[in-house]
Image (spheres, coloured by chain):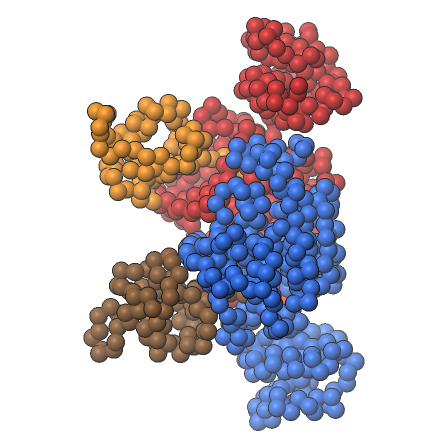
Chain colours: A blue, B brown, C red, D orange
């Protein structure tokens, strides 16, 4: 033990005993984004002995508004490498395990098995349900955090006999009913608040200090600092999962690359070459369209290949941004070697920035 | 009865609270259970019907569809959220 | 405007308008410690245009447990420089103003005048009262945050006609009644939670989004995630301050250097040379003392100089750690060129680690 | 009446809550105002008397010394804290 942690070892309710428990603990943080970074910065600072890092994304410009460990120099680099380097510099006593992958039903059980606790810092439902089911199967607790705009959720699931994520939300919502994280904004500091709260719950689970937020969902509204704690019960059948589902919908938020109209307008005024596909109907297209746009109606995407040159980045636009996202999903699957972006807000929004 | 709205339900309704009459002057049926409340709200805001997974809290406790509700209860609609 | 902030400009209640207000804003953060760092990381990420940094401390080992921007390589460096470099790398669009000083009654008005908002991220009462009084005189709002163990306070003071810190706590507590930050521990993640909450309140003040936490004190207990909001009123006379007090007690927490018994025992077993002064009475000293200790009773500190060699670091011990702190304050003032540490918990605690 | 304790008051009492009798079986005077409550507590925990600046909240509102208190009130002692 050294003087590094004196400020917390001097706490009567924590002490050298709490510190020793942290040092022995192994925590997996799934997702190196808005939630995962503050969780890791603080668990690493406080002296958690082993930290598992898992992500496969690269740092993008629109991450910087809330993912505070990344600098402008890190743009385009693998998050996993950047985080690993910075956390090592912060605390050389920590053992880091890097998982250069997303969590999948193939790797989930094998990876999670090696940890005492999982922190769910993902940004999509499929991975959240996968974490839940894997943790139930392996009998591991996990600290849940999730965001929407100015709001956030926190809870600790599967802690001892406590309830699971499925006791609150039995089935995964389908893609149409809840917006995904790209359509949905978030004020930059909200993941900071929720991530630090997750780190605290992780410490409580690992050390036994305080009351773990199990059987309670904390719902936070940043607009008015309103906090509700909703109690809920264990539904026994949700604790009896013995195998993963055959299928967790593979929606990864960050494989739906998008661009805002201001950024796109800047691109248009630059010397960059690109292809712009307008996926609206021929009638809509004829009424008004951007000069450089090529019309490939959504129903007609099969004609895509014949109409474009494949050596440039492809931008996709529609009226409001819904069809362009659908088109992007189809095209990206069909043409994995091309780079696609869809334009957020579509022509409606575009009209507000270009004369 | 006042209902607190979170997540997508707040976006659908366009407000963070919603008032539900507790006595009917229009002949409309007043909701007496969580299920009836969901139906009542779904008539005014059809988008709410799409939510397959929606937690309803009555007095800060998760409530099943069959639970009865009263005018003095604190009710909140808490849909799942996914961002991170 | 660029795509960097799209995740928050796409929020209906924030928008490009909110972003533009942030960019125009000038915020002074007083203190680059546990609270100040998360405040700055997030305000900088979110695009506040001008950030003022103020601190004169260097990075010490015991800071790392909660001050997450610092790495082990930064030990001994000026916090101001480290923070300035890292925040510049994070967001090159931000204008930084560095204030290489502590806030004093001589500089407070001149410095604060240039900002729209102050964030009180200090760790001691004198500076908190000074910030309050200066902000009242200059009619600036300030975001208050403070910690104790697993607990924290947040409020926005002097916002429009709202109340001030003195409306809650009229007079500064004296040093004996409330422990200072060195005696008092803090769990590493608690300042992260409170600092991110402060950053959110700063954004609300600057943009007009949401309800500012004015006239309410948010009291947070991390042990059970219990949040109270206490409403309190403006006391008109507290808004009428027209000049600073002649004297704000100059207690700077970080000028009372201390060491824990474990770290001191490690030092004893090393080859390092040091001087150990035991400030208990002769009677106490005679009953039991550490071998290398020199007895200079507290009442007799004037004899100090004659008894020690002044080329080594001086450690001070007493029975429980109270008298050693008093002795340290006296000696440090009398001998500004020497380095003093007092031993936390004194002989009581020392007995638990040395045979 | 149950009193929530924060900051140094929690450390002094050694617990996060404190029960104050609302009817006297010992002949001790039952506190009827914030001031009397402070005096009552100060007799048992003399360290509390040292606190020159101590906010008392009654039902989540800052209360002056003269405010009357009842057995059903939610009371909290909130001393200033300085860490950062």
Q: In this orientation, which residue lies closer to the viewer: A73 or B75?
A: B75
- In the rendered image, the quadrant that contains the C terminus of chain A is bottom right
Q: In this orientation, which residue lies closer to the viewer: A28 or B81?
A: A28
Q: Would you say A268 lies left or right of C174 here?
A: right
Q: Would you say D63 lies left or right of C183 here?
A: left
- Regarding residue C102, the answer to whether it shows in the image is no
Q: Residue at x 68, y 6 (%)?
A: C306
Q: Position of residue C92 (x, y in %)?
A: 68, 55
Q: Position of residue A304 (x, y in %)?
A: 70, 88
Name above or below for residue D58 compared with residue C250.
Answer: below
Q: Residue at x 32, y 60 (%)?
A: B74
- In the rendered image, the quadrant that contains the N terminus of chain A is top right
**Total marks in image:** 0
Quadrant in the rendering for residue A284: bottom right
Q: Residue at x 37, y 57 (%)?
A: B60
Q: In this orientation, which residue lies closer to the viewer: D6 or B80?
A: B80
């Amino acid at each position: 033990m050294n003087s590094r942690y004196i400020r917390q070892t001097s706490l009567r309710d924590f002490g050298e005993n709490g510190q020793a428990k942290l040092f022995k603990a192994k925590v997996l943080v799934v997702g190196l984004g808005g939630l995962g970074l503050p969780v890791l910065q603080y668990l690493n600072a406080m002296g958690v002995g082993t930290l598992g890092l898992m992500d496969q994304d690269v740092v993008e410009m629109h991450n910087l508004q809330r993912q505070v460990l990344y600098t402008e120099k890190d743009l385009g680099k693998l998050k996993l490498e950047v985080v690993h380097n910075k956390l090592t510099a912060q605390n050389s006593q920590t053992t880091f395990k890097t998982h250069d992958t997303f969590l999948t039903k193939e790797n989930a059980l094998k990876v999670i098995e090696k940890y005492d606790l999982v922190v769910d810092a993902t940004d999509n439902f499929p991975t959240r349900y996968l974490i839940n089911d894997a943790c139930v199967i392996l009998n591991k607790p996990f600290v849940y955090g999730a965001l929407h705009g100015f709001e956030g959720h926190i809870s600790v699931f599967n802690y001892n006999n406590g309830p699971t994520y499925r006791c609150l939300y039995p089935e995964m919502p389908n893609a149409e009913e809840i917006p995904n994280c790209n359509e949905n904004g978030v004020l930059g500091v909200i993941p900071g608040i929720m991530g630090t709260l997750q780190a605290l719950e992780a410490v409580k689970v690992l050390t036994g200090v305080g009351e773990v937020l199990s059987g309670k969902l904390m719902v936070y509204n940043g607009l008015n600092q309103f906090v509700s704690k909703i109690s809920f019960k264990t539904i026994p059948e949700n604790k009896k999962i013995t195998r993963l589902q055959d299928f967790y919908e593979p929606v990864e938020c960050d494989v739906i690359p998008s661009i805002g109209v201001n950024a796109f307008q800047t691109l248009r005024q630059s010397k960059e070459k690109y292809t712009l596909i307008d996926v609206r109907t021929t009638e809509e297209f004829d009424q008004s369209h951007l000069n450089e746009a090529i019309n490939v109606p959504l129903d007609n995407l099969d004609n895509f290949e014949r109409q474009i040159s494949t050596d440039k980045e492809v931008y996709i636009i529609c009226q409001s941004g819904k069809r362009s996202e659908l088109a992007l999903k189809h095209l990206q699957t069909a043409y994995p070697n091309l780079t696609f972006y869809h334009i957020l807000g579509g022509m409606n929004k575009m009209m507000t920035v270009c004369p | 009865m006042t209902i607190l709205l979170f997540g997508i339900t707040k976006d659908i309704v366009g407000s963070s609270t919603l008032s539900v009459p507790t006595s009917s002057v229009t002949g409309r049926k007043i909701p007496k259970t969580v299920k009836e409340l969901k139906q009542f709200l779904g008539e005014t805001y059809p988008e709410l019907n799409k939510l397959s997974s929606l937690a309803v809290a009555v007095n800060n406790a998760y409530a099943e569809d069959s639970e009865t509700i009263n005018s003095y209860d604190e009710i909140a609609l808490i849909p799942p959220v996914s961002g991170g």
